[in-house]
Image (cartoon, coloured by chain):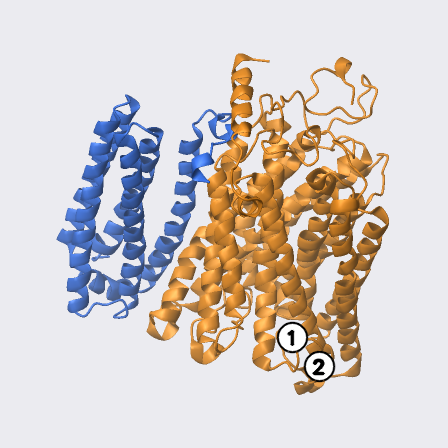
Chain colours: A orange, B blue
């Protein structure tokens, strides 16, 4: 041990002794410990998922059985419908996917995986969660103000979003923008923390090429977020002043241009897809080597294609605007970049498959989720080709084909990726195993209905069903029985999917107390978080670890076990 | 909680070879650059579209007040640099003193700005007079907000520095202050000088 690290461990011991002298709840609520903050993010995210899921249930019921009362909600008005659809999208992306995948997993994994005791700015970390929590309260409040929640779609295109005469929600629209802006601030602070921590607080020996992929991907996602969100914050300031002060940034009658918002929104909106995709990809990249007992195939390639994806993601935004009247020459350009970006992402999927190839695969619940991610996301990616080509997009634009496409990307990202991560790191977080049988029931009960929801939507979209329509009975050519049957199928599947989340919740809380003891390293994995006790203590380790090798050393001939953790010094002294 | 708070060990590590605080500040600056970047790019796009009309509007901004403010801000940055230099050699008192001068000049900047706003609005060029003015008030207002934030933070840093505590923060707030300066260096030509384009 070097002199510096001895000095470090002394300071580490001192830091751990300084215990918090507050009441338990208070110290939990105001903790600066990265693990506690991670739980806070994940719990908040999951509660918001309940709200978002409830919204999906209500508007799906309205679409399948229009004009009838929805059990648990009542009669749905067109205004309600718009608010539900808008806030379902907003909440699921900004208050479910982001906090769980980026902030939750980022907070939990980064310090544990790079071998340090906490984030470099623990109090900023806490502030970030507090701002996020307030933003969640604001978005919930916006649903209950006079006029109801904002109903101008999650993209908030002006003039629908700027003019209360059009959106009929003078307060809801403003609160919506405020909530989203607060949420951005929270994740900016959080992202700065993630990037700085990973750059500066790595354990001795943790070189750039020894950082686990999920950490890399969360960091790259944070940087993408940081770089892309700025223009939208500026755009949100302009939107707010259009709403409140009556300026004309987006009002063409007074010299403004509504297209400006679309550019600012999608300049953020498209990288945002990768902001949530990359952490999910990272989670899968961690799980696959563990349950295939094989070294990750092409670590550096994975890293470089991730960076390439990140860079390319800034040059594809206008593919959301092919029908907004943009110059056809520009549409050509963006078609090319959009099709290009599928190359690095496909490469990443191939690397996952290559890692699986020839491994001794064990189908535990996390692995099932990881493989489901690959399969379902592939469908989402392939259907994206049709939408990314400007020619075909003119026909598909704003139909349910688009809805099905982005749910085939976002559902694997936000839901499958989330469950993969939770089932994989649950033993680390709580020291106990989840129940395998119920985990598998939950898995199949989620995956099968998911396909039954969204595959019909592809056909509905091809049948010409337009998005954002409250009641299809008003459109004779869309009110046909064969289309309505598909809608009912999707709605029934939605209800089944929601019902199958109950086993997960019960399993989660039961296993937290009564699950099988997991021990330090239940999966025989190699990364650093498995080298401390489960759950890790405040300060994470007794003595902070030193890193000796890359993150995915499985099946090395010199050692007895089939894995060699990052913190074990030499293969000879390895005792698992 | 703050009385029992001890920074974790992670804070003192330097795997990237830079002090953590400075690194974090640079990332803050990076994220701010894109915020102002988005605003400035939007303005430039509109400006190109509205050429003549906006040039006419821009000629109503107070060039001399803007020039004075540029001078004031640059001088304040000079003091921020001197404060950093003093903090480097451990002279907290001197650093605090110099930071107070920076804050005062920030105050002068805001006073000039307030005078400008008042006289523009009285002359009929309020935020709703024309889209140019909407941009003017949004951009300079957002910048002014950053000046205020910088002054407040600098106040805390100076208070600690006077007691010889957290001297490394003098440099960080300096980096931020220079950034606020540079934003103005972009806004000044865009809104004040470029009236003849």
Which residue is drawn at the image coordinates 43% and 45% (left, top)? B31
Cβ atoms under marks 2 and 1 closer than 8 Å: yes
Q: Nearer the viewer, residue A359 or B103?
A: B103
**Helix, strand or loop for disc 2:** helix
Q: Position of residue B53 (x, y in %)?
A: 25, 66
Q: Which of A259 and B165 is in front in this view?
A: B165
Q: Mark 2 points at which residue?
A: A478
Element at badge 1? loop
Residue A448 in the image, given as x and y percentages of width and height: 82, 60
Q: Label 2: how many residues lie within 10 Å, few (<14), some (14-19) or many (20+)? A: some
The answer to which quarter of the image holds residue B86 is top left
Q: Is residue A155 visible?
A: no
Chain where mark 2 sits: A
Q: Mark 1 points at which residue?
A: A466
As displayed, is residue B62 above or below residue A286? below
For marks 2 and 1, give the CA distance.
9 Å
Residue A129: x and y in percent read 52, 49
Q: Where is residue A165 in the image (x, y as percent from the top left)?
A: 44, 80
Q: Residue B27 carries which label?
A: none
Q: From the viewer's perspective, tell me whether residue A473 is left or right of residue A30.
A: right
Residue B33 lies left or right of residue A184; in this view the side is left
Lower position in the chain sequence, tag 2 or tag 1 = 1
């Amino acid at each position: 041990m070097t002199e510096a690290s001895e000095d470090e461990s002394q300071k580490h011991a001192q830091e751990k002794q300084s215990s918090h002298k507050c009441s338990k709840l208070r110290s939990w609520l105001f903790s600066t410990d990265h693990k506690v903050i991670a739980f806070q993010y994940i719990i908040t995210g999951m509660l918001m998922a309940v709200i978002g899921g409830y919204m999906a249930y209500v508007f799906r019921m309205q679409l399948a059985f229009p004009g009838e009362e929805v059990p648990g909600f009542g009669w749905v008005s067109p205004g309600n419908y718009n608010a539900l659809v808008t806030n379902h999208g907003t909440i699921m992306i900004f208050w479910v996917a982001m906090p769980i995948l980026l902030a939750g997993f980022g907070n939990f994994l980064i310090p544990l995986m790079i071998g340090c005791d906490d984030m470099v700015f623990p109090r900023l970390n806490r502030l970030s969660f507090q701002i996020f929590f307030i933003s969640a309260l604001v978005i919930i409040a916006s649903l209950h103000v006079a006029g109801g929640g904002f109903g101008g779609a999650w993209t908030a295109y002006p003039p629908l979003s700027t003019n209360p005469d059009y959106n009929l929600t003078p307060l809801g629209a403003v609160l919506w923008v405020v909530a989203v802006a607060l949420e951005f601030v929270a994740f900016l602070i959080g992202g700065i923390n993630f990037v700085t921590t990973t750059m500066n607080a790595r354990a001795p020996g943790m070189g750039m090429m020894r950082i686990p992929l999920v950490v890399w991907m969360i960091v790259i996602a944070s940087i993408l977020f940081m770089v892309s969100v700025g223009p939208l914050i500026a755009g949100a300031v302009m939107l707010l002043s259009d709403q409140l002060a009556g300026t004309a940034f987006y009002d063409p009658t007074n010299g403004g241009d509504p297209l400006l918002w679309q550019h600012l929104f999608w300049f953020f909106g498209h990288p945002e897809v990768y902001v949530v995709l990359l952490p999910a990809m990272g989670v899968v990249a961690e799980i696959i080597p563990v349950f295939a007992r094989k070294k990750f195939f092409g670590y550096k390639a994975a890293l470089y294609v991730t960076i390439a994806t990140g860079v390319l993601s800034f040059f594809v935004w206008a593919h959301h605007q092919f029908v907004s009247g943009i110059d056809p020459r520009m549409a050509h350009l963006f078609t090319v970049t959009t099709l290009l970006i599928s190359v690095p992402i496909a490469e990443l999927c191939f690397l996952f498959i290559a890692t699986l190839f020839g491994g001794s695969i064990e189908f535990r619940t996390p692995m099932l989720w990881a493989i489901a991610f690959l399969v379902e996301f592939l469908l989402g990616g392939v259907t994206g080709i049709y939408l990314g080509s400007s020619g075909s997009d003119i026909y598909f634009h704003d139909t349910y084909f688009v809805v099905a496409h982005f749910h085939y990307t976002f559902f694997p990202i936000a839901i499958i990726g989330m469950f993969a991560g939770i089932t994989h790191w649950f033993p680390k977080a709580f020291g106990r195993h989840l129940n395998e049988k119920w985990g598998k029931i939950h898995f199949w009960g989620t995956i099968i209905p998911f396909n039954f929801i969204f595959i019909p939507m592809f056909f509905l979209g091809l049948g010409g069903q337009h998005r954002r329509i409250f009641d299809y009975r008003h459109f004779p050519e869309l009110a046909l029985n064969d289309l309505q049957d598909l809608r009912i199928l999707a709605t029934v599947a939605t209800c089944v999917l929601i019902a199958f989340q109950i086993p997960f919740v019960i399993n989660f809380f039961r296993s937290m107390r009564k699950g099988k003891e997991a021990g330090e390293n239940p999966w025989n994995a190699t990364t650093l978080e498995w080298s401390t006790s489960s759950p890790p203590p405040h300060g994470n380790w007794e003595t902070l670890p030193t890193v000796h090798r890359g993150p995915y050393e499985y099946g090395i001939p010199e050692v007895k076990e089939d894995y060699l953790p990052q913190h074990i010094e030499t293969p000879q002294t390895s005792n698992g | 909680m703050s009385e029992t708070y001890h920074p974790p060990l992670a804070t003192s590590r330097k795997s990237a070879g830079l002090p953590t605080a400075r690194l974090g500040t640079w990332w803050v600056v990076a994220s701010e650059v894109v915020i102002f970047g988005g605003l400035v790019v939007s303005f430039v796009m509109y400006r190109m579209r509205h050429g003549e009309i906006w040039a006419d509007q821009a000629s109503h901004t107070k060039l001399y007040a803007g020039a004075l403010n540029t001078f004031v801000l640059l001088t304040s940055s000079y003091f921020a640099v001197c404060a950093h230099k003093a903090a480097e050699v451990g002279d907290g008192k001197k650093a605090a003193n110099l930071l107070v001068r920076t804050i005062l000049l920030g105050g002068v900047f805001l006073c000039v700005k307030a005078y400008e706003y008042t006289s523009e609005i009285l002359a009929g060029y309020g935020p709703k007079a024309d889209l140019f003015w909407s941009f003017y008030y949004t951009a300079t207002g957002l910048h002014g907000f950053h000046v205020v934030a910088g002054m407040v933070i600098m106040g805390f840093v100076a208070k600690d520095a006077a007691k010889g505590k957290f001297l490394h923060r003098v440099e960080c707030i300096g980096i931020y202050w220079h950034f606020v300066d540079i934003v103005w260096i972009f806004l000044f030509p865009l809104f004040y000088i470029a009236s003849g384009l």
